[in-house]
Amino acid sequence: MTQIHQRVLKGRVWVALHMHAGDGNVHTNIPVNSDDYEMLQTAHEAVKRIMKLARSLNGVISGEHGIGITKLEFLTDEELQPFADYKQRVDPEGRFNKGKLLRHAQMDGATSVYSDLTNAYTPSFGLMGHESIIMQQSDIGAIADSIKDCLRCGKCKPVCATHVPRANLLYSPRNKILATSLLVEAFLYEEQTRRGVSIKHWEEFEDVADHCTVCHKCVNPCPVKIDFGDVSMNMRNLLRKMGQKSFRPGNAAAMLMLNTTNPQTIKMIRGAMVDVGFKAQRMANNLLRGFARKQVTRPRKRTAPLPSRSR
Ligand code: SF4
Ligand code: SF4
């Protein structure tokens, strides 16, 4: 009897409401256990009923926190059209937030997809059941745990040597944390739905881990004290453990030099690396500089200081 009671309690859908007394915003939260399919279906039905009720009371679907993928299906084409028109005008090639809030987004060439929940996979909505077991018992869990408090504030960006906005926006500590979180979710999904993790995802994981000089500078400005240098080291250790670390001759030579204790060998390796390696690097840099110029040139200024006001 107690077991049945517990099961019913665990699967019971209830709705938490938070409201703004001033402007009439109502936030609805429906906590679910993602390993309970029936509960998820009931929750979806509850969402539909809430949206219908809001409309019947002359309310609107778009509240304080925007529309996002969960509310899109409840908006009419007429409501979405002004946004679609504006997006077409300012971003005809769909570079910003590709597909977001568009009913039939053109993604990857000609394929037409919905940008609502149809194609979403978000275990973070409720990390339960098998996923939490995988997380608890693996190094992936420790990595996810070390970045889980990130506030996405971006205070770590200016101090990071791999954050070069004019080249790309991919490798600030903040964005590396975002990428790592997404890859962890991909690992979890693949672990449960396929036989192992895609090699492509390991390559992406390595790409993130390798874009860090382990200088530890990002820890100082960070309000929650995330040191992405430590996270990078843990990521590299995991790659090594899983046999997914690529062989890099430069890294191997540097490690050999650091680990060697014989002075003659150190002198020999140093000679090869500094006298030959650095010269080759400089020569390659001089040869290829022209091709990289477009990427590293500072962009033209597009704003001018405001004229001072005369009184
Ligand atoms: S400073 Fe810290 S909390 Fe803010 S984005 Fe960077 S890592 Fe995240
Ligand atoms: S430790 Fe890595 S992520 Fe942090 S500032 Fe240094 S290079 Fe950037």
Image: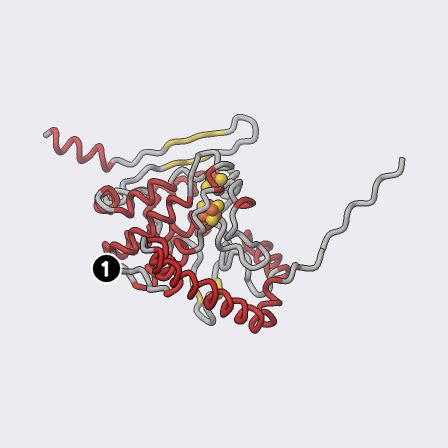
**Which residue: 57% across, 54% down?**
165
User: Which of the two residues, 55 or 47, is positioned nearer the viewer here?
Assistant: 47
User: Which of the two residues, 29 or 289, is positioned nearer the viewer here?
Assistant: 289
Left or right: 151 as drawn, with respect to 201: right
Residue 261 coordinates in the image, percent (x, y) = 32, 53
Left or right: 107 as drawn, with respect to 193: right
For label 1, the residue is: 196
Residue 254 coordinates in the image, percent (x, y) = 38, 58
**Which residue: 35% across, 61% down?**
252
- Image quadrant where residue 158 sits: top right
- SS for callout 1: loop
Position of the N terminus by quadrant: top left
Q: Given the current orientation, which residue lies at the most extreme top position?
A: 21
Structural crowding at the residue carrying mark 1, measured as other residues with C-alpha within 10 Å and reported as few (<14), some (14–19) or many (≥20) = few
Residue 83 coordinates in the image, percent (x, y) = 58, 54
Amino acid type of the residue tagged 1 in the rendering: Gly
Q: Given the current orientation, which residue lies at the most extreme left position?
A: 1
**Residue 205 can be seen, yes or no:** no
Instruction: Examine the rendered structure and indicate whether residue 236 appears above or below residue 94.
Output: above
Residue 295 coordinates in the image, percent (x, y) = 59, 64
